[in-house]
Image (tube, rainbow, N blue to C red):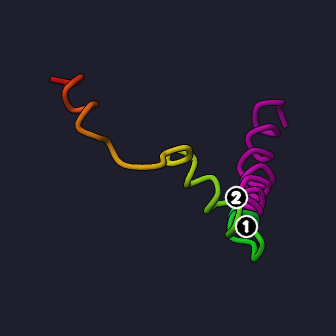
């Protein structure tokens, strides 16, 4: 068996299995029970330090 065929067999079976296991691990890690607070905190980053919506001053500056 030449090297190419051996590497092709390994890539077709074991690497696919490893990638699928990694994918499932990422999904389980993202949806773990304690991650809700982390995801909510990360989702609110763009809205931090925003005490009030835009005022008329900012609207005048944009015009």
Q: Is residue 8 left or right of residue 62?
A: right
Q: Earlier in the sequence, mark 1 or mark 2?
A: 2
The boundaries of the magenta stretch are 1-26
Q: Position of residue 9 (x, y in %)?
A: 76, 47
Q: Which residue is painted at 80% across and 37% down in the image? A: 7
Foreground label between 1 and 2: 1
Q: Position of residue 49 (x, y in %)?
A: 55, 43
CB under 8 Å between discs 1 and 2: no
- Specify the farthest residue to the bottom: 33
In the picture of the structure, the residue carrying the numbered disc 1 is 35
Q: Is residue 61 left or right of residue 38?
A: left
Q: Position of residue 22 (x, y in %)?
A: 76, 56
For numbered disc 2, what is the local secondary structure? Answer: helix
Q: In which quadrant of the rendered image does the N terminus lie?
A: top right
In this picture, is 11 found above or below 4?
below
Queried whether the magenta region covers residue 51, the answer comes back as no
Q: Residues within 10 Å of mark 1 (few under 14, many from 20)?
A: few
Q: In which quadrant of the rendered image does the C terminus lie?
A: top left
Q: Residue 23 — which label?
A: 2
């Amino acid at each position: 068996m030449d090297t190419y065929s051996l590497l092709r067999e390994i890539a077709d079976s074991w690497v696919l299995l490893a990638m699928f296991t990694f994918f499932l691990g990422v999904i389980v890690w993202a949806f773990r029970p304690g991650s809700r607070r982390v995801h909510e905190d990360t989702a609110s980053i763009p809205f931090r330090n925003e005490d009030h919506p835009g005022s008329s001053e900012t609207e005048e500056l944009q015009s």
